[in-house]
Amino acid sequence: MAANPSLVDGRTVHFLLRANPDGIDLATRQNAAGVDLNRNMKYGWAPSSPGSFTYGGPSPYSEPESIALDNLIQTLKPSRILSVHAYADLIDYDTDGGLVLAQLMAKKNGMTVAPISYPTPGSLGHYCRFHSISLVTLELPSGIAPTTMWNWQKSALLTFIHATL
C-alpha cells in the first residue's frame, strides 16, 4: 500500500502481521505457553481446561500478546477491525457493523458469510462488542498460493477499508 497510497484514499490503515508469532512458528492456534490468545481477552473470558484446543489461559490477559493487542487497540481506537485467520473458508462477523462489512466483502470475493456457531469466551469478538468496534474475521481456505490469494481477496479487502458504515 505504501507503493500505491491511492488504494487507501487518505484513510489510515494499520496492519498487525503477527498477533501470535509463537502460533505461526509452531503451526498452532496457541502460543508457546499453550494458550489460545483468541480466548485470553478480558470480555467474556471463562475458565477452561489447560491443554484443551481453546484453553484461554489461567486468567484474562495472562499472556503478553493479549496485553499488547489490548494496548494497541486502546491506542489506535479503530472503528473497525479485520482479523485474518486460516482454514474455515468463510467470513465471520461480530456486531451489526461487522455484518454489513462482511456482506460487502462477500460480494467481492464470493465467500459465505456466517456467524461462528459455537461459544468463543474471551475472544476478540467479545472485546469488539464491548467496545463497539465492527469486527470481521476473514477465514481463508488452505492450500492457495499467496499471489492467487491476494488476487482473489484484494477487492474484498479494499471494500473493507473504503466502506462507510
Image (cartoon, rainbow, N blue to C red):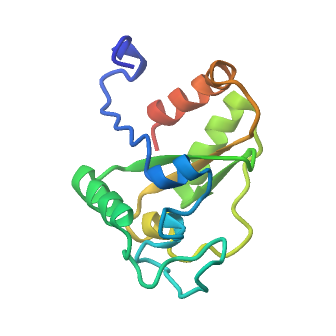
In-front residue for pair 77/31: 31
Please state the horizontal and vertical placement of residue 113, each as a whole percent of the image: 72, 48
Query: x, y (%) of residue 56?
Result: 52, 76
Q: Residue furthest top?
A: 3
Location of the N terminus by quadrant is top left
Residue nearer the viewer, 76 or 99: 76
Q: Is residue 64 visible?
A: yes
- Residue 59: x %, y % from top left: 42, 84
Q: Is residue 13 left or right of residue 139?
A: left
Where is 31 relative to 148, above or below? below
Q: Nearer the viewer, residue 12 or 62?
A: 62
Q: Is residue 54 above or below residue 106?
A: below
In this orientation, which residue lies closer to the viewer: 99 or 49?
49
Which quarter of the figure has residue 48? bottom right
Say which residue appears at 66% left-offset and 71% top-offset: 53
For residue 117, what is the image quadrant?
bottom right
Direction left: furthest residue: 75
The location of residue 12, given as percent across then percent down, is: 30, 33
User: Which residue is pictured at 65% across the width and 53% down the height?
Assistant: 92
Q: How many marks?
A: 0
Q: Is residue 83 left or right of residue 133?
A: right
Against 111, is 64 above or below?
below
Q: In percent of the image, x 66 and y 43: which residue is there?
A: 103
Does residue 125 show up? no
Q: Residue at x 43, y 72 (%)?
A: 41
